[in-house]
Image (spheres, rainbow, N blue to C red):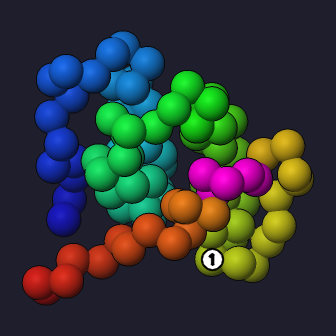
C-alpha cells in the first residue's frame, strides 16, 4: 500500500484537506497509519472528531508516532477518543 485508496469525491473541503494531510505527513510510517485511518473513517467523523484530528495533525511525527505506539503520552488537550480509535485501527493488509 503506497497511498490513498479513497477518492475525495463527495467530501467537503475540510475533509479533503484532512485526507490529504493524513497521507502527506513527512514520514512513511505516519502516512500509512493516519492515511489508512482517514481512508476508512474520514467520511464518518463528526465535526468534533475533525477538530480533534486537526489538533493531532499539529503534533510532530516523532511525538505522534511515539504516542500511537505507546512510548509517549500526549497532553490531555491533544490526546482524546480519536487517538484511541487511531491506535486501535488495523493498519496492515490482511491479504499480504
Q: Is residue 90 magenta?
A: no
Q: In this picture, which residue range is highlighted in magenta? A: 79-83
Q: Nearer the viewer, residue 16 or 58?
A: 16
Image: 34 above or below 96: above
- Residue sitting at 44 percent across and 54 percent down? 34
User: What's the magenta bit mostly, secondary-structure-wise?
Assistant: helix
Observer able to see residue 6: yes
- Indicate the position of residue 26 as horizontal and vertical percent values: 47, 48
Where's the C terminus, which quadrant? bottom left
- Residue sitting at 52 percent across and 61 percent down? 86
Q: Nearer the viewer, residue 64 or 75?
A: 75
- Residue sitting at 27 percent across and 22 percent down? 11
Image: 76 above or below 52: below
- Indicate the position of residue 54 as horizontal and vertical percent values: 60, 32
User: Position of 79 compared to 43: left or right?
Assistant: right
Residue that numbered label 1 is attached to: 69
- Indicate the position of residue 90 as horizontal and vertical percent values: 38, 74
Image: 79 above or below 45: below
- Indicate the position of residue 32 as horizontal and vertical percent values: 36, 61
Secondary structure under tag 1 reads helix
The image quadrant that residue 81 belongs to is bottom right
Amino acid at each position: 500500500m503506497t497511498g490513498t485508496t479513497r477518492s475525495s469525491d463527495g467530501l467537503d473541503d475540510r475533509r479533503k484537506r484532512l485526507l490529504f494531510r493524513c497521507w502527506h505527513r513527512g514520514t512513511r510510517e505516519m502516512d500509512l497509519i493516519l492515511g489508512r485511518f482517514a481512508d476508512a473513517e474520514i467520511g464518518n467523523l463528526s465535526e468534533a472528531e475533525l477538530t480533534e484530528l486537526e489538533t493531532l495533525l499539529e503534533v510532530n511525527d516523532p511525538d505522534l508516532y511515539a504516542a500511537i505506539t505507546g512510548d509517549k503520552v500526549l497532553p490531555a488537550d491533544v490526546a482524546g477518543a480519536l487517538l484511541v480509535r487511531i491506535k486501535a485501527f488495523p493498519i496492515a493488509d490482511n491479504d499480504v
